[in-house]
C-alpha cells in the first residue's frame, strides 16, 4: 500500500516538473544574451523620448522667464 | 535644470529605466498561455493605474475650480484629463494586442473590456464638451461638474461592475479570476510592478505639467 501511494506521489511530482518545463519561455534567448539587445533598444528609445521631453521643458522654462520679464 | 524643482522627473526616468531593465530580465512565473507576455504587467497594467491616478488629479482640480473659480485650476483639470486619456488609449491598445495572443481575439465581449471602452468614451465626451462651449467660465464650470460624474462612472465601470457577483470576466482580477498578485512568484513581480506604476504616472504628470505651463504662457500672452 505504502509503495503504491509512493509511486503515485512520485509520478505526480515528475509530471509537475514536466509541466513546468513544457511552458515555453524565452530561456534560450536569455541564455544567448539576446534579450539584452531588446532591453538596450528600448532604453535607447526611452532615452530619446526623455531627451525630447527635457528639450520641451527647457524651452517652456525659457518662455516663462521671457514672459515674466516683460 | 533646476534640481530643486525637477527632482521628481529624475526619479520618474530612473524608475522607467529600472522597469525596462528589470521588467525584461527579472524572474517571472512560468504559466501556460501567458508565457513571457506576463511581463506586460509592467507596461499594460501600469498604463491603467497611471490613467486612474492622473484622472484623479483632474477630478481634484475640477472640484478645486468649483470652489475657487480660478482659471489655473481649470487648465490643470483639463490637461490632466488629456494626459489620463492618452494613457487610457495606450492601455486599451496594448490590452488588445495582449488579448489577441492570449485569448485569441483583439476584443472579446467581456465586462472589463467593455467597461474600459465605456470609460474612455465618457472621457472623450468630456473633451467634446470642452470643445463645444465657447464661453470660458461656462466651459470651466460645466466641464468641472461633468468631470465629477465621469470619475464616478470610471470607478463603476472599471472597478465595481466587472467585480460584481454574477458578472463573468476573463480578465485577471475579475469575475473570480486571480489577479497576477496572487501567483507564486508575485514577490519578484511586485518589485518591478509598483515602481513601474509610480514611474509611468510621473512621466504622465510631467507631460501634463508641460502642457499646463504652455497653456499658462498662452493665457498671459492673451491678457497682455
Image (cartoon, grey):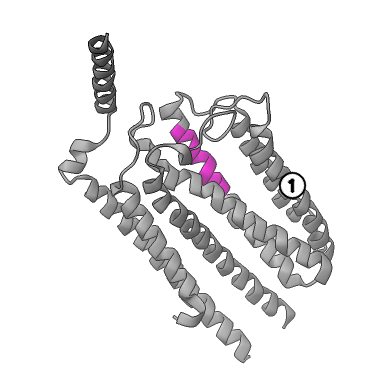
Relative image position of residue B107 (x, y in whole percent): 54, 28
Q: Nearer the viewer, residue A64 or B99?
A: B99
First to last magenta residue range: B87-98
For the residue pair A58 and B167, the one nearer the viewer reads as B167
Measured as percent of width and height from the top left, residue B220 is found at 69, 79
Q: Position of residue B196 (x, y in %)?
A: 44, 54
- Relative vertical location of residue A2 with respect to residue B73 in this rendering, above or below: above
Residue at 63% in and 76% down: B217
Give the side of residue B171 with respect to residue B127, left or right: left
The reply to whether residue A26 is in sight is yes
The residue at the point 54 percent across, 27 percent down is B170
Q: Secondary structure at mark 1?
A: helix
Q: Is residue B129 left or right of residue B201?
A: right
Please tell me in which quadrant of the rendered image residue B216 appears.
Answer: bottom right
Residue B202 part of the magenta segment: no
Judge whether residue B89 is colored magenta.
Answer: yes
Apparent side of residue B24 relative to residue A55 in the rendered image (left or right) = left
- The quarter in which the N terminus of chain B is drawn is bottom left
Residue furthest bottom in the image: A69
In the rendered image of this protein, does residue B192 appear above or below residue A27? below
Outermost residue, front direction?
A1
Residue B134 appears in the figure: no
The residue depicted at 73 percent of the width and 54 percent of the height is: B131
Quarter of the figure with residue B145: bottom right
- Apparent side of residue B33 relative to residue A69 in the rendered image (left or right): left
The residue depicted at 32 percent of the width and 52 percent of the height is B22
**Residue at numbered disc 1:** B152
Amino acid at each position: 500500500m505504502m509503495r503504491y501511494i509512493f509511486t503515485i506521489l512520485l509520478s505526480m511530482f515528475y509530471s509537475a516538473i514536466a509541466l513546468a518545463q513544457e511552458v515555453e519561455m524565452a530561456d534560450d534567448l536569455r541564455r544567448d544574451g539576446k534579450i539584452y539587445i531588446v532591453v538596450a533598444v528600448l532604453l535607447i528609445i526611452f532615452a530619446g523620448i526623455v531627451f525630447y521631453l527635457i528639450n520641451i521643458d527647457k524651452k517652456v522654462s525659457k518662455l516663462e522667464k521671457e514672459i515674466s520679464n516683460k | 535644470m533646476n534640481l530643486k524643482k525637477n527632482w521628481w522627473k529624475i526619479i520618474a526616468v530612473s524608475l522607467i529605466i529600472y522597469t525596462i531593465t528589470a521588467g525584461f530580465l527579472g524572474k517571472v512565473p512560468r504559466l501556460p498561455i501567458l508565457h513571457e507576455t506576463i511581463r506586460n504587467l509592467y507596461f499594460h497594467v501600469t498604463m491603467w493605474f497611471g490613467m486612474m491616478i492622473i484622472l484623479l488629479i483632474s477630478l481634484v482640480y475640477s472640484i478645486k475650480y468649483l470652489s475657487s473659480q480660478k482659471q489655473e485650476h481649470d487648465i490643470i483639470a483639463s490637461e490632466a484629463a488629456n494626459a489620463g486619456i492618452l494613457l487610457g488609449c495606450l492601455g486599451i491598445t496594448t490590452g488588445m494586442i495582449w488579448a489577441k495572443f492570449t485569448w485569441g481575439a483583439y476584443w472579446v465581449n467581456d465586462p472589463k473590456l467593455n467597461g474600459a471602452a465605456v470609460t474612455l468614451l465618457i472621457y472623450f465626451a468630456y473633451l467634446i464638451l470642452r470643445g463645444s462651449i465657447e464661453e470660458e467660465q461656462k466651459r470651466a464650470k460645466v466641464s468641472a461638474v461633468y468631470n465629477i460624474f465621469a470619475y464616478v462612472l470610471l470607478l463603476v465601470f472599471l472597478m465595481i461592475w466587472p467585480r460584481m457577483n454574477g458578472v463573468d470576466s476573463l480578465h485577471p482580477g475579475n469575475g473570480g479570476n486571480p489577479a497576477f498578485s496572487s501567483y507564486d512568484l508575485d514577490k519578484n513581480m511586485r518589485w518591478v510592478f509598483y515602481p513601474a506604476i509610480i514611474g509611468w504616472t510621473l512621466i504622465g504628470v510631467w507631460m501634463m505639467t508641460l502642457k499646463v505651463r504652455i497653456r499658462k504662457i498662452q493665457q498671459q500672452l492673451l491678457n497682455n
